[in-house]
Structures are given as structure tokens and as C-alpha cells.
Amino acid sequence: MKQDSFTYDITVRCEAQKAVRLLSEFNQHSDLHPLIVHVEQVAAPQGVLRRYFITDQLKWGPFAFKICYQADILRVSENEILTEAFQSPNTTVTNHTSLTQKEGDLHIHVKITLQAPDLLFGYAFNQARIAHLAMAKRIKTALEA
């Protein structure tokens, strides 16, 4: 197993509540995340605020394929969102987002940590980084609209 993290930052002119709603409701993420093609909210077990099954469309060389994974919203407050996604085989993506409001500007700091089997790690990490950096631009546009 390998694990690594990457971060990104977004500064927007909006209230934290608007960003928290957008970032913590995955039903809205098919417009934000470039790989997502379907989001289905399902009943969440105790200790999980919301649970989703998400389908992504991926490419590997000439091959296009879909993967389905479970994504859980674990913690949401006005200054923090914690989510965790699980996909077979043994792949976990944790998203820890912190929000800081200062004089009308909202600073969003995102840390993505991915853990995956050695053979999958490079591909999965690269796809996650590309998708989340593209998503950051879409989040900024959506929050400023």
C-alpha cells in the first residue's frame, strides 16, 4: 500500500455557508467534478452524515471504463468538511477541507489523501490530482456566480 497527499487553495468572495452547502452535498458534484457521471444518495449508517454511491468515467490509454465507489460525509461545520471515499480494491480518498472567512473573502484549503495498492497508486493519485485541480476552478466559478 502507498499513501500520499496533495493540497489546493481557493479564495472566493462569498459567505462560508454557501461554500459549505456546495462542498458537502455530493448531489451537486456531477457539475463540478470532471470524472463524475452519476451520484446516488443512499441511507447513511450511524456516525455518517450522508452517504453516496458515485460513478466516475475514467480513461486508461485507449480504454474507457466506469468505477463506482462509496463516498461518506463525516463532518460538516461552518469551517470544516471531512469526507472519505472507498473503492475496491482497497482504495481510500480522504478530503479534509477547511474554510476561513476574512473581510468578505473566503479561503478554502483542501487536503486530499489517497491510499491505494502499489500497482494502482500512481494512476489513482494522478487521476485524483487532475480531477480535483479542475474541480477547484469549477468550485470558484460556481461560488462566484
Image (cartoon, rainbow, N blue to C red):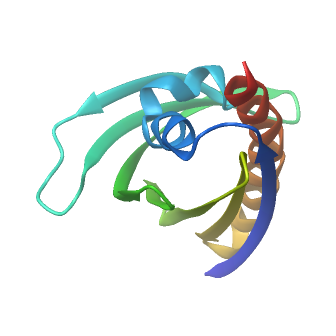
**In the image shown, does 92 or 99 lie closer to the viewer?**
99
Q: Based on the displayed image, in which of its 4 quarters is residue 75 positioned?
A: bottom left
Considering the image in quadrants, where does the C terminus appear?
top right
Residue name at image x 88 percent, y 35 percent: 61
What number of labels is visible? 0
Q: Residue furthest right?
A: 61
Question: Looking at the picture, does residue 49 appear above or below residue 75?
Answer: above
In which quadrant will I find the N terminus? bottom right
Q: Nearer the viewer, residue 51 or 107?
A: 107
Q: Which residue lies at the image location 18% right of the left edge and 63% below the top edge?
A: 47
* Residue 96 percent location from the top left of the image: 56, 65
**x 67%, y 32%: residue:** 33
- Would you say 42 lies left or right of 111 here? left
Q: Would you say 24 lies left or right of 122 here?
A: left
Is 87 left or right of 11, judged from the image as shown? left
* Residue 105 position in % (x across, y down): 75, 48
Residue 63 in the image: above or below residue 50 = above
Q: Nearer the viewer, residue 75 or 12?
A: 12
List x then y, in percent, for residue 16. Answer: 56, 46
Residue appearing at x 42%, y 35% in the figure: 25
Quadrant of the image occupied by residue 67? top right
Rendering coords of residue 29 (x, y %): 56, 29
Q: Is residue 61 visible?
A: yes
